[in-house]
């Protein structure tokens, strides 16, 4: 039985190489010696064809209309490419400049904004945030315990997870930042006893600082604190202190700031090759999950975090703050831990990754990850969600894509980023591993 499945997988794999080339339109760009991306250049056409077909097959398994991805090696973009159609109705082909909504990856931007204020000496990570808030933030089960900036950044504030609270979500809100009643007074209505949206269940039974409980509301508070301390609206602060210094011209929390024709359309897979097209979402909690960006832009931010706070000669954070953000602050279940605004995954007590995933936003999924032992990193965006009937297939496909991107990155590291050997070896090793992993499904 296993031999028959292996043969079937081998036939499928070889078929993907030779006959699958035109299934989904592909655009590709490879880094030139001057570190710019030039359309149409490939490291090795044969190796790339094999690699492309594996990506395409995984996209089909995950029901993703388009994907944009990049690999960072040696503190620069080594590879970037777009696959598929980001707007199926208008046959628009994805590139590295296509803009996607990245959901909870937004938290890494929000956390970086607060850490910049820390670098300026305006706050201390372990001081009580009530010093800055116009209301008292206290878990009523522990009224004498202060809640600190570090606790908010690491999801250890004792605020309960908010995914089940209908009073939290305002997903169909149609306005744009700045929103007059967000973050405050909305936060007061949600967090202060007697408020319109308040419930005692928003607080866990854990003492502040004791337990990792992933709760989006922590980052609503962080955004509000950035506004109070900087005297700027949150979206303006990020534009001035993060996006502009890092040359992130296609990045914003405001849809109206972007070229709508270059923004990926959100889709949800139904069945039998049919998709539901969503309207572009605008959410109230934009610092938590509302960022839109391209892999080209976000790679600048990622490189700054890989490169001790510096991108292209511009420093956005101190080296000490970068290290603190990517250090485990709170241990969770299994491999899932948290730093300061960054998830820390630990596998087999050996491989440690820092990054963030973006899910649960209708029509989009995203991943950004750094392998900490060698600062190799990947970003991938898709305009298909993993909600409801597509959770299992979508999750498997995203994980498969993530793994082969890291494999390609490892071979770049070994053989050199501009080596034909690197590309070809990567393609054939990836094909072999792909057949071993996926021929039984």
Image: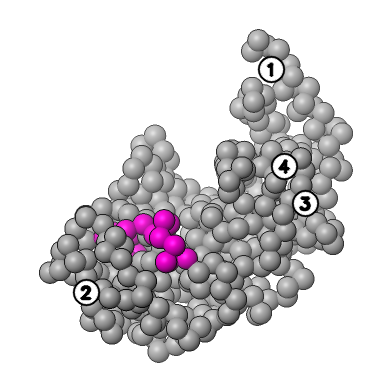
Which SS does the magenta portion mostly show?
loop
Residue 368: in sight, yes or no? no
* Whole-percent x, y for residue 359 in the image: 54, 54
Q: Is residue 101 above or below residue 233?
A: above
Residue in the picture at 52% in, 84% down: 178
Please tell me which of labels 3 and 2 falls first in the chain.
Answer: 3
User: How busy is the neighbourhood of tag 3: few (under 14 within 10 Å), some, or many (20 plus)?
Assistant: many
Q: Which residue is mark 4?
A: 271
Question: 92 or 174, which lies in front?
Answer: 174
Q: Which residue is mark 3?
A: 84
Q: CA distance from mark 1 to mark 2?
A: 59 Å
Q: Is residue 284 left or right of residue 433?
A: left
User: How busy is the neighbourhood of tag 2: few (under 14 within 10 Å), some, or many (20 plus)?
Assistant: some
Q: CA distance from mark 1 to mark 4?
A: 28 Å
* Whole-percent x, y for residue 166 in the image: 44, 62
Q: State which quarter of the image contains the N terminus.
A: top right
Quick one: SS at disc 1?
helix
Please tell me which of labels 4 and 2 falls first in the chain.
Answer: 2
Residue 16: in sight, yes or no? yes
Residue in the picture at 58% in, 49% down: 387
Chain part drawn in magenta? 152-169
Q: Which residue is mark 2?
A: 128
Q: Which residue is mark 1?
A: 6
Question: Which label sits in the foreground, 1 or 2?
Answer: 2
Q: Does the magenta segment cover residue 342?
A: no
* Whole-percent x, y for residue 360 in the image: 54, 55
Please tell me which of labels 1 and 3 falls first in the chain.
Answer: 1
Question: 49 or 171, which lies in front?
Answer: 171
Residue in the picture at 66% in, 67% down: 280
Question: Which label sits in the foreground, 4 or 3?
Answer: 4
């Amino acid at each position: 039985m296993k031999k028959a499945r292996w043969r079937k997988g081998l036939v499928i794999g070889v078929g993907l190489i030779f006959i699958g080339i035109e299934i989904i339109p592909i655009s590709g760009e490879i880094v030139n010696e001057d570190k710019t991306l030039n359309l149409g250049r490939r490291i090795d056409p044969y190796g790339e064809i094999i690699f492309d077909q594996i990506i395409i097959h995984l996209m089909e398994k995950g029901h993703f209309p388009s994907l944009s991805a990049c690999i960072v090696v040696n503190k620069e973009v080594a590879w970037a490419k777009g696959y598929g159609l980001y707007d199926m109705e208008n046959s628009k082909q994805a590139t590295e400049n296509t803009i996607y909504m990245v959901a909870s990856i937004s938290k890494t931007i929000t956390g970086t904004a607060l850490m910049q204020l820390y670098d300026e000496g305006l706050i201390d990570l372990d001081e009580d945030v009530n010093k800055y808030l116009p209301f008292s933030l206290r878990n009523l089960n522990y009224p004498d315990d202060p809640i600190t900036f570090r606790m908010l950044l690491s999801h250890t504030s004792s605020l309960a997870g908010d995914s089940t609270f209908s009073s939290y979500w305002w997903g169909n809100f149609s306005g744009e930042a700045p929103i007059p009643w967000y973050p405050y007074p909305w936060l007061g209505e949600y967090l202060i006893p007697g408020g319109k949206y308040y419930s005692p269940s928003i607080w866990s039974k854990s003492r502040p600082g004791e337990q990792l409980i992933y709760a989006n509301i922590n980052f609503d508070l962080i955004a509000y604190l950035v506004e109070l301390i900087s005297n700027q609206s949150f979206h303006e602060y990020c534009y001035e202190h993060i996006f502009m210094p890092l040359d992130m011209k296609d990045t914003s929390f405001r849809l109206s700031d972007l070229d709508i024709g270059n923004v990926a359309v959100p889709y949800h897979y139904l069945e039998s090759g049919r998709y539901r097209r969503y309207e572009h979402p605008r959410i109230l909690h934009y610092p938590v999950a509302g960022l839109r960006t391209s892999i080209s832009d976000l790679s600048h931010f990622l490189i700054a975090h890989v490169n001790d706070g510096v991108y292209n000669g511009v420093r956005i954070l101190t080296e000490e703050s970068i290290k603190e953000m990517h250090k485990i602050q709170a241990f969770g279940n299994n491999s899932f831990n948290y730093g300061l605004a960054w998830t820390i995954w630990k596998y087999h007590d050996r491989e440690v990754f820092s990054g963030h995933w973006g899910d649960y936003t209708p029509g989009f999924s995203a991943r950004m990850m750094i392998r900490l032992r060698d600062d190799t990193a990947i970003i991938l965006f898709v305009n298909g969600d993993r909600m409801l009937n597509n959770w299992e297939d979508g999750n498997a496909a995203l994980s498969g894509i993530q793994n082969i991107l890291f494999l390609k990155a490892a071979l770049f590291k070994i053989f050199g980023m501009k080596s034909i050997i690197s590309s070809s070896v990567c393609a054939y090793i990836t094909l072999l591993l792909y057949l071993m992993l996926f021929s039984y499904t």
